[in-house]
Image (spheres, rainbow, N blue to C red):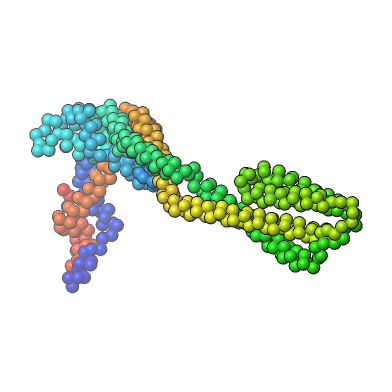
């Protein structure tokens, strides 16, 4: 029964709502007008607030390139636009910069209420907290632009504060991203230059001590010489083996030829003498040719001289035996074989001597190569030290130049932040917004009036219409009397 009555009492029709509104229309009107009046008067008598704004562009520059302190690695580019802009905003809104702005303008000008108030918080600290509330920074979407806005009752102070804040941001940015290491790098350059001179001196002393100009070139020349000597020795051995075979064949043939034969005429004997003289001439020419390449004490010269003497003695012997009568004498073929055998033996001895000489030269070259090989490790260590010190010196010298350029750019205040639009003195206040406040007052006043009307209806009790009584008591109404206040 109780739930049924509650459901009935909760049923409100549009007619009931209109009835309540008309019943309490004057109350609603009073609340509405009072609210609007208070809002309008408050907006009119409120101190106007002006907003000065400035826009700056943050360019991705040298500050955001990582330069390795050591080594020759290339600079690493670390461009993260969102993080870079957020970093600049944090610097912009830092307490140090706000403190500088407040101290430059003066607390008594920017926030006089804190200068006069008696508070446990120092006026500057209180001003910083207030300025943090009045200052707003916005990163414009899809750009490198930051909007800086500051609200104050004095338009000139608002513009001055924003411009000062931007100027201090530029200074602070250069301080944070400055690279004060030019002096340190110059000391490192001097140290590495001294180290390079020491390593060069050690390498030069090593070269002079062992008579080395270029180990690689000298090793190449010795290897080439060793190869040439090997080729020459191989050729000499081949020639010697050929002579050995030839000499063996001649020695096998000569016993089969008669040593003496009948000489029929002087002319035949003369022919042998002429051939011997021709051979003597060849030997002398060969001796003259060898004299241009070897000394007189060389075995080659001595061997050819022995052959010349033997040939001359042979000619004298033949000339002494020369006569017009027919006599017995040495067989020319036998003599020719003797000469050829003698010549082959001489050449064989010469080739043996040359082979020994070449072998001795090969041993000397091998000894030099072994010595170079033993010095190679030390030489390469010294040469590598020079190369390393040279590279380190060049790297630090390059870094010094970069640091000097960066230092000069810092001194010229060349930062990657550019002011797009400096703050100007605002003409129109941003607060209060009269039209907006009136609209809000109308909405709030209307809502408050309606709410108060329904509250009064609920608290007063009674029935506005006979139907409500019939619905609640479930009895017919005989008559109704209208009551007007």
Whether residue 29 is visible, yes or no, is no
Q: Is residue 129 left or right of residue 345?
A: left
Find residue 237 and report its image quarter.
bottom right
- 116, above or below 202, in the image: above
Task: Give the residue drawn at x 66%, y 47%.
Answer: 301
Front one among 429 and 106? 106
Q: Residue at x 20, y 39 (%)?
A: 129
The foreground one among 148 and 338 is 338
Most foreground residue, 304 or 141: 304
- Give the x, y percent position of residue 46: 22, 33
Position of residue 284 in the picture relative to residue 373 (left or right):
right
Return the x and y of residue 195 as percentages of the image width and height: 36, 40
52 versus 378 height, above or below: above
Q: Residue at x 41, y 50 (%)?
A: 378
Q: How many marks?
A: 0
Q: Which residue extends farthest bottom?
A: 1
Query: x, y percentage for residue 9?
Result: 21, 64
- Is residue 99 at least partly visible in the picture? yes
Residue 485 position, x and y percent, is 16, 48
Q: Nearer the viewer, residue 74 or 335?
A: 335
Q: Is residue 284 above or below residue 234?
A: above
Report which quarter residue 362 is drawn in. Answer: bottom right
Q: Quadrant of the N terminus?
A: bottom left
Residue drawn at x 72%, y 65% is 248
């Amino acid at each position: 029964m109780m739930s049924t009555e509650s459901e009935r009492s909760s049923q409100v029709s549009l007619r009931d709502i209109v009835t309540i509104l008309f019943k309490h229309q004057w109350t609603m009107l009073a609340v509405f007008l009072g609210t609007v009046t208070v809002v309008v008067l408050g907006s009119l008598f409120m101190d106007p607030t002006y907003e000065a704004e400035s826009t700056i562009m943050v360019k991705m520059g040298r500050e955001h390139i990582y330069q390795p302190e050591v080594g020759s690695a290339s600079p690493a580019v670390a461009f993260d636009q969102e993080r870079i802009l957020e970093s600049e905003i944090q610097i912009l809104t830092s307490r140090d910069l706000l403190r500088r702005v407040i101290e430059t303008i003066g607390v008594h000008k920017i926030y006089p209420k804190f200068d006069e108030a008696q508070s446990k918080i120092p006026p500057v600290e209180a001003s910083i907290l207030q300025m943090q509330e009045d200052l707003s920074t916005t990163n414009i979407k899809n750009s490198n632009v930051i909007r800086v806005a500051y609200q104050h009752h004095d338009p000139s102070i608002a513009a001055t504060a924003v411009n000062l804040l931007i100027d201090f941001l530029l200074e602070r940015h250069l301080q944070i991203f400055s690279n004060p290491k030019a002096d340190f790098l110059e000391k490192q350059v001097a140290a590495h230059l001294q180290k390079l001179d020491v390593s060069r001196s050690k390498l030069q002393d090593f070269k002079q001590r062992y008579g080395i100009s270029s180990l690689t070139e000298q090793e190449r020349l010795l290897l080439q010489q060793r190869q040439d000597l090997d080729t020459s020795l191989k050729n000499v051995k081949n020639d010697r083996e050929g002579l050995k075979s030839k000499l063996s064949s001649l020695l096998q043939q000569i016993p089969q030829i008669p040593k003496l034969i009948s000489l029929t005429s002087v002319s035949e004997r003369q022919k042998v003498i002429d051939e011997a003289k021709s051979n003597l001439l060849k030997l002398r020419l060969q001796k003259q040719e060898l004299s241009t390449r070897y000394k007189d004490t060389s075995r080659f010269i001595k061997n050819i001289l022995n052959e010349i003497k033997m040939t001359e003695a042979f000619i004298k012997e033949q000339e002494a035996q020369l006569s017009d009568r027919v006599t017995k004498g040495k067989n020319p073929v036998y003599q020719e074989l003797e000469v050829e055998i003698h010549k082959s033996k001489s050449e064989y001895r010469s080739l043996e001597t040359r082979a020994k000489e070449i072998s001795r030269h090969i041993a000397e070259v091998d000894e030099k190569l072994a010595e170079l090989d033993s010095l190679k490790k030390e030489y390469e260590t010294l040469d590598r030290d020079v190369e390393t010190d040279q590279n380190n010196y060049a790297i630090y010298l390059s870094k010094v130049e970069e640091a000097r350029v960066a230092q000069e750019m810092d001194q010229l205040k060349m930062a990657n932040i550019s002011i797009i639009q400096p703050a100007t003195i605002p003409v129109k206040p941003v607060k209060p917004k009269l039209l907006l406040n009136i609209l809000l007052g109308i909405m709030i006043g209307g809502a408050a009036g309606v709410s108060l009307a329904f509250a009064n209806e609920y608290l007063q009790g009674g029935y506005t219409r006979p139907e409500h009584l019939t619905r609640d008591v479930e009895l017919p109404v005989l008559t109704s009397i209208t009551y007007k206040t």
